[in-house]
Image (cartoon, rainbow, N blue to C red):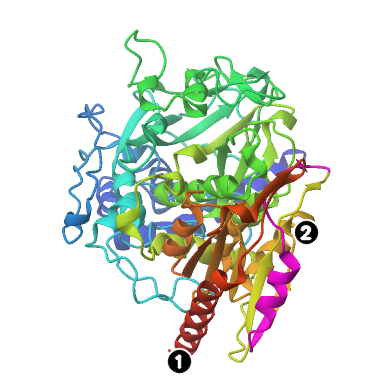
């Protein structure tokens, strides 16, 4: 009698599997000739056997009689565009076509559709994520006008696909990155066939690991700082992460002497910290271990130096909580800086676009052990939507990730690239990222055409439980005078908000509900990204050459940008709490007036569409 519940569960499972596989097979047949070829080989199987095997092949990626992994030429490098090349497409070396995509289903996430606990209608489309849209479609698709319900007013000056900037800083770079796929560790011969292993979130993992693997996309972006190269995105199948193999460290193992101050909040990874049942096909020259030349000298090289091929998992290993586990490492201290944290967010978002996964299937695991910060909530709200974000240092036992992905360091993100002067134009990719954040936080814009809401960001010393900023640079010495000066403009509603004292969600909402932002150069101006498409940013500087960070994101997001620079060195002073600039109102007025006029005109035009 005790076997009756098990029998009922088995019957229920087969029924669910039959139904889901029917949906999958129908969808796959309509668009994938590889799976048509698979089914053509199965004439002797019953209908249900055929559907089950087809589903397994969908999970593993098609016909598993592929030839040995091909060799790869020297790393492709994007050819940088110069100003006189602006009218010509960038030549990007084509990657060799390989069978390596078969490891994980051609970059389409299919296995969540047979998982228990996934909310919403079953089916792969819920979790697929195209490069330039949030639903499956060819990467050659050129438009995205209806991508996001809260971001209706797209710019007419967007970067066209034929423009060099599209291949450097827009979706074109992700398309190039996606093509650079190479196998690193592949399932052994004969391991990819048989009855599919069904993994249930948080359940004990099988004692013998199911076939796994590792694949990476490696390139070099010509506009990024050389020490961040190569630029590599990796994802794996059936990967075990063992937090017991981590030890606290002040520095990265392969990046000694950099960002090593303070507490030991990085980790060193012993062999077996990451493992999968696979055979390494891209090895170090010694013939042992993963080829570390695939990774930059930072967190990624440390992580994959620990990679171990093994089919034996550690005791008490459980299946991960979500279909996809994304591993993220942040830089010490930068995780509380809005601009540097933005590079981590943007990189993680880009990574999901490249591998074709939507946030609804993802759980983020933070590999560093930096102190909690005020910006941490973004991960759950935007990226880690399949299960709550967790910290590796808090995990009590190893986890088996059906699919794992490692986000590259934020320092290697294009937001920190140096040479972008020939690409000062709206980028589709930045707009799409902004729209995704807008959707996640349900930002509401100011639709009142009679009023321009201006958000003024002050800078003052502050100390909280998470951040100690007793000294703050670039404070405004005559702040009250500046505020009153802005208020005098008709039709302007000015809000002064100190982001240091409100939650991240309220910071994003404050920006999204404003028409323009004004403030001294500082990380908080990164919130200008959440302004509506007609918005404007007026950045003030105590001196010239403070950095082009906010100019860059304003141009790429398609908002109007103005930059006031202190014209008189005598208006600058310092003391023990920071440095201060007295803003000359006469010289500020032209910048302010141009921004207000531009925003008003752009807003009116947006609502006439």
- Percent across and percent down for residue 584 are 61, 66
Which of the 4 image quadrants contains residue 105? top left
Q: Nearer the viewer, residue 388 or 448?
A: 448
Point out residue 30 in the picture as x, y percentages from the top left corner. Answer: 31, 63
Q: Label 1: which residue?
A: 608
508 or 212: nearer the viewer = 508
Q: Residue 203 in the image: x percent, y percent?
A: 68, 37
Residue placed under numbered mark 2 in the picture:
502
Q: In the image, is 88 to the left or to the right of 190?
A: left
Residue 328 vs residue 457, the one in the foreground: 457
Q: Is residue 261 above or below residue 530?
A: above
Q: Where is 380 relative to 252, above or below?
A: below
Picture disc at residue 518: none
Residue span colored magenta: 465-493
Q: Residue at x 39, y 20 (%)?
A: 292
Q: Quadrant of the C terminus?
A: bottom left
Q: Between residues 280 and 372, which one lies in front from this camera angle? A: 372
Q: Position of residue 591 (x, y in %)?
A: 51, 72
Q: Is residue 203 left or right of residue 295?
A: right
Q: Earlier in the sequence, mark 1 or mark 2?
A: 2
Residue at image position (65%, 56%) is: 381
Residue 88 quadrant:
bottom left
Asked which secondary structure carries label 2, the reply is loop
Residue 114 drawn in magenta: no
Label 1: which secondary element:
helix
């Amino acid at each position: 009698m005790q076997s009756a519940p098990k029998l009922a569960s088995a019957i229920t499972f087969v029924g669910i599997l039959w139904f889901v596989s029917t949906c999958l097979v129908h969808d796959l047949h309509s668009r994938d000739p590889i799976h048509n070829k698979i089914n053509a080989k199965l004439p002797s199987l019953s209908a249900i056997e055929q559907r089950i095997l087809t589903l397994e092949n969908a999970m593993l990626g098609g016909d598993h009689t592929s030839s040995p992994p091909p060799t790869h030429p020297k790393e492709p490098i994007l050819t940088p565009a110069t100003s006189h090349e602006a009218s010509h497409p960038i030549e990007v070396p084509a990657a060799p076509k390989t069978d390596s995509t078969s490891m994980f289903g051609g970059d389409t996430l299919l296995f969540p559709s047979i998982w228990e606990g996934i909310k919403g209608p079953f089916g792969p489309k819920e979790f697929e994520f195209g490069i330039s849209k949030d639903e499956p479609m060819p990467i050659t698709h050129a438009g995205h006008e209806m991508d996001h319900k809260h971001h209706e007013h797209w710019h007419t000056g967007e970067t066209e696909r034929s423009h060099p900037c599209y291949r450097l800083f827009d979706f074109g770079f992700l398309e190039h990155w996606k093509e650079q796929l190479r196998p690193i560790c592949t399932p052994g011969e004969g391991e990819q066939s048989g009855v599919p292993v069904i993994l249930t979130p948080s359940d004990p993992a099988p004692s013998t690991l199911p076939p796994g693997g590792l694949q990476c996309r490696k390139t070099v972006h010509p506009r990024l700082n050389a020490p961040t190269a190569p630029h590599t995105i990796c994802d794996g199948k059936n990967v075990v992460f063992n937090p017991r193999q981590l030890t606290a460290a002040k520095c990265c193992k392969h990046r000694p002497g950099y960002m090593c101050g303070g507490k030991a909040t990085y980790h060193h990874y012993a062999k077996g910290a990451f493992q999968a049942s696979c055979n390494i096909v891209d090895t170090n020259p010694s013939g042992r271990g993963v080829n570390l030349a695939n990774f930059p000298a930072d967190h990624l090289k440390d992580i994959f130096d620990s990679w171990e091929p093994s089919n034996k998992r550690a005791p008490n290993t459980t299946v991960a909580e979500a279909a996809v586990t994304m591993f993220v490492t942040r830089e010490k201290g930068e995780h509380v800086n809005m601009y540097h944290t933005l590079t981590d967010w943007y990189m993680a978002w880009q990574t999901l676009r490249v591998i074709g996964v939507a946030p609804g299937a993802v759980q983020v695991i933070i590999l560093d052990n930096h102190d909690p910060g005020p910006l941490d909530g973004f991960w759950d709200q935007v990226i880690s939507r399949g299960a709550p974000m967790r910290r590796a240092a808090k995990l009590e036992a190893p986890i088996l990730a059906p699919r794992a992905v490692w986000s590259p360091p934020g320092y290697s993100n294009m937001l920190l690239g140096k040479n972008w002067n020939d690409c000062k134009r709206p980028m589709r990719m930045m707009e799409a990222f902004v729209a995704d954040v807008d959707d996640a936080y349900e930002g509401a814009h100011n639709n009142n055409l009679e009023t321009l809401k201006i958000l003024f960001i002050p800078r003052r010393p502050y100390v909280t439980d998470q951040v100690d900023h007793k000294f703050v640079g670039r404070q405004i010495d005559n702040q009250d005078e500046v505020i009153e000066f802005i208020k005098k403009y008709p039709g302007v509603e000015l809000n002064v908000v100190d982001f240091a004292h409100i939650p991240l969600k309220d910071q994003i909402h404050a920006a999204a509900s404003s028409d323009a932002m004004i403030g001294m150069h500082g990380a908080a101006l990164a919130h200008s990204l959440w302004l509506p498409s007609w918005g404007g940013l007026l950045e003030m500087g105590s001196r010239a050459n403070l950095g082009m960070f906010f100019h860059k994101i304003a141009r790429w997001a398609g908002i109007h940008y103005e930059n006031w620079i202190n014209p008189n060195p005598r208006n600058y002073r310092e003391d023990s709490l920071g440095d201060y600039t007295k803003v000359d109102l006469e010289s500020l007025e032209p910048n302010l007036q141009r921004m207000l006029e531009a925003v008003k005109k752009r807003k009116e035009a947006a609502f006439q569409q």
